[in-house]
Amino acid sequence: MVGDASSWSRALVKISPYTFSAVGIAVAIGVSVLGAAWGIYITGSSLIGAAIKAPRITSKNLISWSLNHLSVIFCEAVAIYGVIVAIILQTKLESVPSSSIYAPESLRAGYAIFASGIIVGFANLVCGLCVGIIGSSCALSDAQNSSLFVKILVIEIFGSALGLFGVIVGIIMSAQATWPSKV
Amino acid sequence: MYGFEALTFNIHGGYLEAIVRGHRAGLLTAADYNNLCQCETLDDIKMHLSATEYGPYLQNEPSPLHTTTIVEKCTLKLVDDYKHMLCQATEPLSTFLEYITYGHMIDNVVLIVTGTLHERDVQELLEKCHPLGMFDSIATLAVAQNMRELYRLVLVDTPLAPYFSECITSEDLDDMNIEIMRNTLYKAYLEDFYKFCQKLGGATAEIMSDLLAFEADRRAVNITINSIGTELTRDDRRKLYSNFGLLYPYGHEELAICEDIDQVRGAMEKYPPYQSIFAKLSYGESQMLDKAFYEEEVKRLCLAFEQQFHYAVFFAYMRLREQEIRNLMWISECVAQNQKSRVHDSVVFIF
């Protein structure tokens, strides 16, 4: 199964499972936050501009927040998913004796955490973009016609559900990560 | 990257796009126009406008009002909006916004040159210029005797300079030459603007090419109608049409040989979008053509707001405001001259 000294299959097996795990965790939170930040700036720039001529879209009244902040909160939720999954993934890391680091079970655990991180990271990236763009349209249309807001918010909720799918699959996947038990 | 502007457009354009949409919400509605059409005096008009975005600009104007004051103040509001957006804009939006004013610049140059030819006072002419098309050396336009001097002395420093390459002649300026110059400049300007929009790509290119093509076609029709019965030859007329648009190239060939309005109509009715415009007019009638074209333009400009993440909204907003000011001017004139029965003749409702 393992090829020449310089082949990809050999490299993949010889990279420490801990490296894969660490990269997976980093991607889970890093890319999620990228998606959240991207979404917030898309929404935020439109929201601020639209609020100049229609201030009501950012302040319904002094006590409660405007519904338009929901767009930003949906984007923020994407970053929170990333944080949660990164925390879950890092609890999966266990130390194993150096003799069994390259055991098949260790490799499986490493790949599982890596894949889980990739799934969550990129699912949240596109989810953040989706919510951000809809949020921007939502702010602009709310400024023109306030009856449109709720209709667009429904679309936005469905958009933000996409990120949850990634989180669910990522968590199920990371359940596969079992390291060889210490003897 | 077509279809992916949504990801990056808001970095530079998001804030301003939202602002321009906010301005758009301030345009007068059909209800406002209905109220304005009921007015008996110019002070009534001022009172109705005080509830709109024009309010702050008109509130300190003493009675009796004049139509010119109303138009001047409304234009001032447009110019203020424009300057505010231009200050905030970054490349390439700032260049795009500057392109919008070049049309006014051409009109101003022509206004000054024609005025000087008829020995009018320069100061008086300057007051009539559209404020969006002003540039530093505009007052010195009056000294030029022919096209070459006009170019060398004044226009070489303005953004219009590249458009002059086609019309530098040593001929003396006369009414005919000036009109040809205006159309040649406008042709070069529209083609340049068109190319610039194509370069921007994405939804901007798509929507702007539609709007500019309509503008080019409308100018082609107007040139044809205005040159019927003049000494302009067919080839010269053909040269004034812009090299893009729905009519290019076969429609232009047909328009170039038209000799009366019904032939123009025949040529235009082959194009479905224009068929509906000409269908509104009875045979042999050309007075209502302007209004029909304006209505179609307003319809297209409003559609530009249906898409997000593109620059055409800025163009559309500026044009709609200009149309609104034309409407206000017409209504005020009708009210001032007690011609209220004609008030609906030239008003184009925007929403």
Image (cartoon, coloured by chain):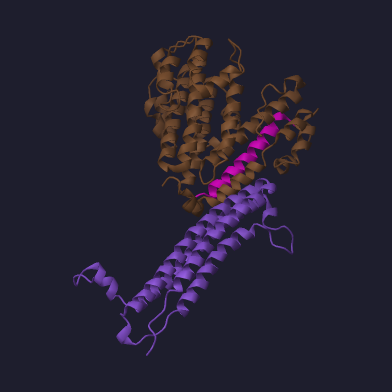
Chain colours: A purple, B brown
What range is drawn magenta here? B65-89
* Chief SS of the magenta region: helix
Q: Look at the picture and state if A170 lies above or below B52.
A: below
- Residue B175 appears in the picture as rendered: no
Residue displayed at 44% across by 65% down: A119
Which image quadrant for residue B194? top left
Is A179 one of the magenta-colored residues?
no
**Residue B3: x %, y % from top left:** 45, 46
Name the residue nearer the viewer: B208 or B36.
B208
**Residue B205: x %, y % from top left:** 45, 39
Name the residue nearer the viewer: B290 or A13.
A13
Q: Is residue B32 left or right of residue B323?
A: right
Is B80 one of the magenta-colored residues?
yes
Q: Look at the picture and state if A51 lies above or below A4.
A: above
Q: Is residue B64 left or right of residue B322?
A: right
Residue that lies at the very extreme toward the left in this rendered image: A4
Quadrant in which the N terminus of chain A appears: bottom left
**Residue B51: x %, y % from top left:** 76, 41
**Residue B345: x %, y % from top left:** 68, 21
Which image quadrant for residue B292? top right
Residue displayed at 59% across by 36% down: B302
